[in-house]
Image (cartoon, rainbow, N blue to C red):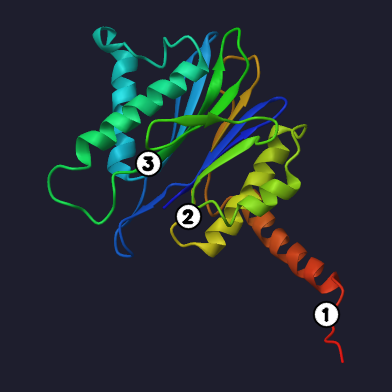
Amino acid sequence: MTYCVGLKLDKGLVFMSDTRTNAGVDNVSTFKKMHTWEVPGDRVITLLTAGNLATTQAVISMLDERSKAPEDRNPSVLEAPSMFRIAAIVGEVLKEVIQANANVGQKGDSSFSATMIIGGQIKGMDPRIFLVYPEGNFIEATDDTPFFQIGETKYGKPILVRAYDPGMGFEEAVKLLLVSFDSTVKSNLSVALPFDVQTYETGTLAAGRHVRITENNPHYKAISDNWSDALREAFVSLPDFRFGD
């Protein structure tokens, strides 16, 4: 399992992913789930992945090959005319990989399914974020739905719904995501540090700050501890429940 979030702000985009993969309690590993392609001055694209590791790695490899080899650049995320078309390319490749592997060879314990978040900006267009499903279709983030989650989503969603503000800055948004991720880590062992964070400021057409947050990161430790204390204080301050006669 995993947990990834793509968040849309007035000033740009923020992405965060964990790095835990597991195939049982005795087979736990760390793998990067955030991938960025950049053509400075033209486009920046970030992809988050959740699901079967073999599937997601195959998709990333195919997108990489089509971005590097001139003879295989059709389709290519570095030449597609819009973020919509890039989302369609990712969906096509994901569907192709799943169909190529789902019904051949020996059966494993997990399916070949995967879900992805793709976001970024192309010169002359607005930043956009899409959620791509295993079937290859996708939906776009809007003002009503300004963020997407994939993987183990339920534990971290409440804080995003309650505290998200499109006008917040990048550092405040990362703080919000750290609370969301911390709640997920404490509720599900299949999600774990380190976390990867990527920001993108609208109009720069260059990748923003990229940070890997480990369990020893002082900011993360302070947020985790203070959030737990704040929740306990809030609970104590609530009116007591009383049974009627």
Q: Which mark is residue 32?
A: none
For the image, the number of numbered tags is: 3
Q: Earlier in the sequence, mark 1 or mark 2?
A: 2
Q: Residue tagged by mark 2?
A: 192
What residue is rendered at 78% in x and 32% in y? 167
Amino acid type, label 1 = Phe
Separation of marks 3 and 2 at Cα, in angstroms: 19 Å
What residue is rendered at 70% in x and 47% in y? 161
Are dots 3 and 1 in contact, CB under 8 Å?
Answer: no
Q: Residues within 10 Å of mark 2 (few under 14, many from 20)?
A: many
Are dots 3 and 2 in contact, CB under 8 Å?
Answer: no
Give the SS element for disc 3: strand
Q: Most extreme residue toward the bottom, as rendered?
A: 245
Amino acid type, label 3 = Ala
Q: Residue tagged by mark 1?
A: 241
Across and down, in percent, residue 50 comes to 42, 43
Separation of marks 1 and 2 at Cα, in angstroms: 36 Å
Q: Is residue 114 visible?
A: yes
Across and down, in percent, residue 6 comes to 57, 36
Locate residue 31 relative to residue 125 in the image: left or right.
Answer: left
Separation of marks 3 and 1 at Cα, in angstroms: 44 Å
Q: Residue tagged by mark 3?
A: 114
In the displayed structure, 41 sits above or below 232; it is above
Across and down, in percent, residue 194 comes to 49, 48
Rendering quarter of residue 165: top right
Q: Residue 213 versus residue 96: which sits nearer the camera?
A: 96
In the displayed structure, 183 sits above or below 67; it is below
Q: Nearer the viewer, mark 1 or mark 2?
A: 1
Locate residue 174 relative to residue 118 in the image: left or right.
Answer: right
